[in-house]
Image (spheres, helix red, strand yellow):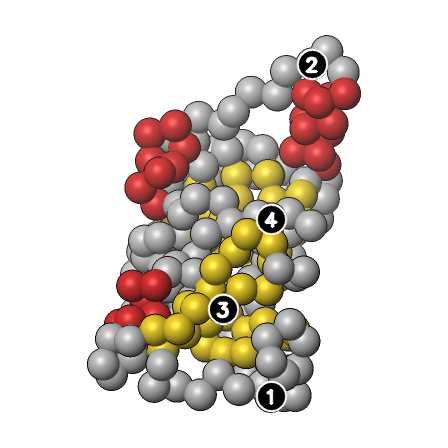
Amino acid sequence: MAALSDYLESGILNHIFRNTTFSKPTTISIALTSGVPKDNDTGATIPELPSGIALGQNFVTTNYQRLNLGSPAATGTSIWASVGVDDTTAYSVFSTEVSHSGYFYPLYLSQASAEAADQNGATQSYTFSKTYPGVTFYAPVSIDVSGSQTDPGYPLYEGNGFIKNTTQFLFNTALRDWGWVSGVAILDSATYGSGNLLMYAQLENPRIVYTGDNIKFDSNSLEISLK
């Protein structure tokens, strides 16, 4: 997720370059959208999934609600990893610095994670001083890390420009069909139809949500990046 809203962009620019202070949000929430939001959207104009549907004279809830992550000042360290840190994911690195060229994988930032991936708990370390100065990667000894000219599909290590969730983010169970879900938005209010849009993205795997479905983001699956 990398697209910033007009609201957040102007707030950051004014905060840094002018004499206006951009206040830290007191609430962070995640919304699901049927289409991809636009930069100038607000919490009232994003194409958010319906919270209810009209059936005759009745308004029936769909059980859709924004996922309230609470105050970042209170919950930030418990549900988000440190910026630029992902100790559980294997990385691919393309480099000519270590004995031969090609992709090296799987590599971990955490030695403990690499030990857990090895059948004997043994690891070997790699450094790529030109590409990732000061970063040590670890690999299970039992897995071949020889170069390959084909991208193995692991996510690339991205430096300090990202943050990931450390816990599972689980939305309510759909009590009615929610319809097509193709976007995700982060806002500063958990109240449906309100607040300021902070950032948004298109989902990599859009889908239709039917009655009984659960939408969730597993740990380390929601990456917020600034590029």
Amino acid type of the residue that numbered disc 2 sits on in the rendered structure: Thr
Q: Between marks 2 and 4, how big is the CA–CA gap?
A: 25 Å
Which residue shows up at 68% across the image and 21% down it? 15
Q: Nearer the viewer, residue 94 or 194?
A: 94
Question: Tag 3, which secondary structure?
Answer: strand
N-term mark: 3 or 1: 3
N-term mark: 2 or 4: 2
Evaluate if marks 1 and 4 touch, with contact meaning CB atoms under 8 Å apart. no
The residue indicated by pointer 2 is 20
N-term mark: 1 or 2: 2
- Left or right: residue 138 versus residue 154 is left
The residue indicated by pointer 4 is 161
Evaluate if marks 4 and 3 touch, with contact meaning CB atoms under 8 Å apart. no
Q: Is residue 163 visible?
A: yes
Furthest toward the top, the residue is 19
Query: In this rendering, which labeled residue sits more in front, label 2 or label 3?
Result: 3
Residue 111: x %, y % from top left: 34, 63
Query: In this rendering, which labeled residue sits more in front, label 4 or label 3?
Result: 3
Which residue shows up at 47% across the image and 64% down it? 137
Query: In this rendering, which labeled residue sits more in front, label 3 or label 1?
Result: 3
Evaluate if marks 2 and 4 touch, with contact meaning CB atoms under 8 Å apart. no
N-term mark: 2 or 3: 2
Query: Which image quarter is the N terminus in?
Result: bottom right
Query: In this rendering, which labeled residue sits more in front, label 1 or label 4?
Result: 1
Q: Mark 3 packing: few (<14 Cα in 10 Å), some, or many (20+)?
A: some
